Structures are given as structure tokens and as C-alpha cells.
Amino acid sequence: RLHYNRYLYEFNQAENAVPLFSDMKECIVPYMFPLLVNNADEVYLRLREKQVPVGRWEYLMTDICSISNQYGRDLIHLPCHQSLKKKELDYIIDVVKESIKIITNH
């Protein structure tokens, strides 16, 4: 929960990215942090190149649901498990911010 809240703080005002949820209910224990980003394909590839353990939900893309298609295309998810060290979390946040800025401004 601590790492999830840090992501919320860091990405709440980000350009070209928005947290899927703007808060976290008291009873929630997240396993990842979902972030909607512009140019998600390019951002995802850059994050993988920088060794960020990022995931996607491409399998959600079908011809049935436009929301699933959007999330499969534009949603990345970042780790927020309790074993992440501060240094690792800082690195992930820095690389995501840098990637979003570089990819969307070129």
C-alpha cells in the first residue's frame, strides 16, 4: 500500500499519463499499480529496455469490448509489492517519468 500510494503521489499530476484509480480504498491490497499512458507501446518497450519490471494486459484486447481494448493497449502496470526497496521504487518512478516525457515529446 505504501508503494502504491507513492506512485499515486508521483503520477497524479503527470503529463501524458494518469493512474487508473485516483485513490485506494482502505480494504484494498494491490498487487500492481495500473497507469494509463499515451504511446504505451513505445513507453513499454523503453521501460523494458531499462530493466523496469513492467507488465501489460494485451490479452484483454478482443473485438468485444472497447474498454478492454483500451486497457490492453494503453495500460501498463508497475510493481508495488512490499519487497521493493526504496532505491528500486525510485528508479522505476524516474524511468517511467523520463520515458513518458521522451516518448510523448518526440
Image (cartoon, rainbow, N blue to C red):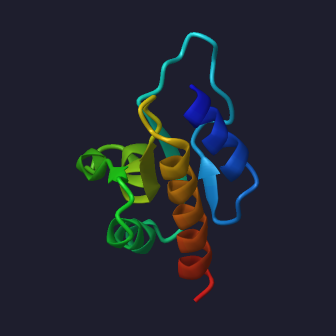
Quick check: 59 left or right of 94?
left
Compared to residue 86, the image places residue 4 above or below, namely: above
Quick check: 60 left or right of 26?
left
Residue at left offset 52%, top offset 66%: 95
- Residue 33 appears at what percent x and percent y? 50, 40
- Residue 84 appears at what percent x and percent y? 45, 39
Q: Give 59 or 26, whichever is nearer the viewer.
A: 26
- Residue 102 appears at what percent x and percent y? 57, 80
Residue at left offset 72%, top offset 43%: 9
Quick check: 85 left or right of 1?
left
Residue sitting at the far bottom: 106
Residue sitting at the far right: 13
* Callout count: 0
Q: Give 87 or 52, whichever is nearer the viewer.
A: 87
Residue sitting at the far top: 27
The quadrant of the rendering that contains the N terminus is top right
Quick check: 71 left or right of 86?
left
Residue at left offset 58%, top offset 89%: 106
Q: Dividing the picture into quarters, in which one does residue 27 lie? A: top right
Q: Dividing the picture into quarters, in which one does residue 81 lie? A: top left
- Residue 43 appears at what percent x and percent y? 45, 70
Residue at left offset 61%, top offset 44%: 7
